Image (cartoon, rainbow, N blue to C red):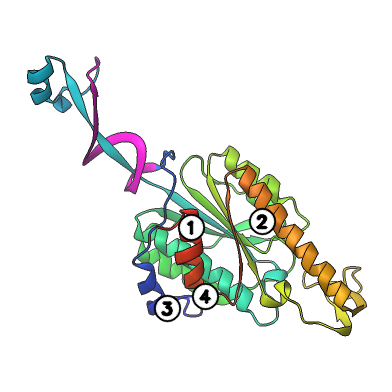
Amino acid sequence: MGAKVIDGKFLNRLEAAALYVRNNMQGYFGGNHQTHFHGSTVEFADYREYVLGDDIRRIDWNLYSRFEKHYIKLFVDERQMHIQTFLDCSASMQKADENKALYAMRIAAAIGYLSVRNMDRTSIRLIKGDVAEDLCGTITGKNSFFRGIGKFDDLQFKGSTDLEKAIINCPSPGSNNGLTVIISDFMTESNWKKAVDYLLFQKRQVMLIQVLSPEEVDPEYNGRIRLVDLEASDPLDDRHMKMKITKSHIKAYKEALKDFIDDIKRFCSSREVDFISVTCDEPIEKLLFERMYLTGTIR
């Protein structure tokens, strides 16, 4: 069942959590998400005055005896949502020790498990080049979830990705029916912001999770080195370079990284998109149960 990615202990820790999707989503009939619409569950929500065409079986005759007006009972509506995860499968997500890719897959697996546990539909789409490949179709139960996650064991991270084209050209992005999570380092030349705006136009709730390696946040290089771009296939690619690393270079890099992350934060804040930046040495439980909890995405 994708033993490299999840195990029984990890799943047990997820049993106490639940994904939260904003209640203005329409979703599908059935499920556990309460919306601001009124439906046919047994949980009472409110009263309103009867109008022609209402179901007379919902009239509260006790209220009629008191006010001599017909009022009907309104009940909470519960819907099934579609939780969609886009996983960046570029070479920069792999890194040398594979921890970054494994961490990203564990996030996708955790979101998928929380979805099916809450009776939602879930999809995991792998961004390769400018295409978003469907890992295993739409998942609607734990058995299909485990079969799908097993495919993570053979997943390769290579080449470059175009987040914009892959997401915008996705054949079934959904509309007003759930949450989309994009997992990436966002170190791409593609216009991923346009993809986020497209999802928002589709009335999707959006969350970005940036996964970085510790050395990307706090590099310890010094002296003469050769920098190799993992997403460049040609050894003569201009993105490869030789240089002498000094303290001033490290300082400039950290300032540029801070500006890069701050730009993502500003963009997300301006659109009410949740954003978390995490390093892959941080316990994933902290990401799920603290940082995603603070955004309100997990409860």
For residue 45, which quarter of the picture? top left
Amino acid type, callout 1:
Leu
Q: Which residue is mark 1?
A: 294
SS label for mark 1: helix
Q: Which residue is mark 4?
A: 283
Amino acid type, callout 2:
Val
Range of residues picked out in magenta:
28-51
Residues at marks 1 and 4 touching, judged by CB atoms closer than 8 Å = no
> Which badge, 2 or 1, comes first in the chain's sequence?
2
Category of crowding for the residue at label 3, using alpha-carbon neighbours closer than 10 angstroms: few (below 14), some (14–19), many (at least 20)? few
Residue depicted at x 46% and y 55%: 297
Residue 232 shows up from this direction = no
SS label for mark 2: strand
Residues at marks 1 and 3 touching, judged by CB atoms closer than 8 Å = no
Amino acid type, callout 4:
Pro
Mark 2 vs mark 1: in front? 1
Residue 22 shown in magenta? no
Instruction: Find residue 289 and report its horizontal and vertical position in percent.
Output: 44, 66
| In the rendered image, the vertical position of residue 105 relative to residue 193, given as above or below | below
Q: Which residue is mark 3?
A: 7
**Mark 4 vs mark 2, CA separation in Å:** 30 Å
Q: Main secondary structure of the magenta part?
A: strand
Amino acid type, callout 3:
Asp
> Which badge, 1 or 4, comes first in the chain's sequence?
4
Q: Which residue is mark 2?
A: 131
| In the rendered image, the vertical position of residue 219 relative to residue 272, given as above or below | below
Instruction: Find residue 19 and report its horizontal and vertical position in percent.
Output: 41, 56
Category of crowding for the residue at label 4, using alpha-carbon neighbours closer than 10 angstroms: few (below 14), some (14–19), many (at least 20)? few
Residue depicted at x 60% and y 74%: 280
Residue 170 shows up from this direction = yes
